[in-house]
Amino acid sequence: MFRTALLRSARQAICAAPRCQAPIARPVARSFLQSKQTPPAACFQAVRCYSAHAGLAKQEVEGRIMDLLKNFDKVTDTTKLNGEAHFHNDLGLDSLDTVEVVMAIEEEFSIEIPDKEADAIHSVKQAVDYILAQPDAH
Amino acid sequence: MAKLSGLQRDVLKLYRQCIRAVRLKPDDTRENFRAFAREEFRKNVAMDKKDFGTIEYLLRRGRRQLEIYQDEGIRNIAR
């Protein structure tokens, strides 16, 4: 007897379920659609603000590094300063100056360059490539 | 630039540590520390790179000096 009661109530519940779900589901769906329609721009922007990091453009990185070198007192001949300039061969910097430049770049983009990578940076181009490869450089 | 020896890299590493330490000094005296570190390294820039004993001694001295000057109590440096 208990079993039949259980089965009956279960069957009733199954039959009733779609009937009561329908009126609940519809307003939810409608409000969901409405909210989507009314402020779509606001929704999109909020998402973009948090997630989308534009990253640094190559030109900007290069410009900032060049400015930094222009203001570096050891660089006397700024005519040779370009995107391909080698710190030693073109700009006449020695290894100590190169360390200073790389440290200044580190400070400029607020990152920390490990010694091994820092040792490998000898030209503007290498520095730009390194910065572009760093996701947290800014 | 020619390939650097291990000892030369050690020197550059110490210089890097010095520059990083300089950043922690107060804004108004930071340049003094920076100039001091620069001068100390420049003093021996003509050192024969085969003179290992002397370079190692200078490195040890430099490390000790860095340790001393890193102290927060030291806020300025006179030259």
Image: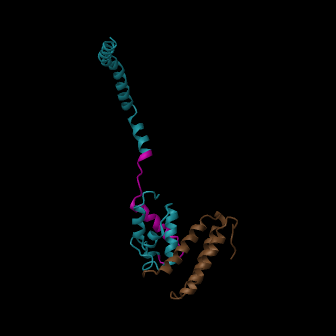
Chain colours: A cyan, B brown
Which residue is situated farthest in the front direction here? A1
Region rendered in magenta: A50-77
Q: Nearer the viewer, residue A25 or A105?
A: A25
Residue A28 higher or lower than A117, as above or below: above
Residue lying at 41% horizontally and 71% vertically, measured from the top left: A82
Percent across and percent down for residue A64 are: 46, 64
Residue lying at 69% horizontally and 69% vertically, measured from the top left: B76
Q: Is residue A26 magenta?
A: no
A93 on left or right of B40: left
Q: Nearer the viewer, residue A19 or A82?
A: A19
Residue lying at 50% horizontally and 68% vertically, measured from the top left: A68
Query: Can residue B46 be spotted in the picture?
Result: no
Q: Choose top left, top right, bottom left or bottom right for residue A131.
A: bottom left
Q: Nearer the viewer, residue A7 or B69?
A: A7
Total numbered circles: 0
Residue B23 higher or lower than B58, as above or below: above
Q: Is residue A59 magenta?
A: yes
A54 on left or right of A1: right
Q: Quadrant of the N terminus of chain A?
A: top left
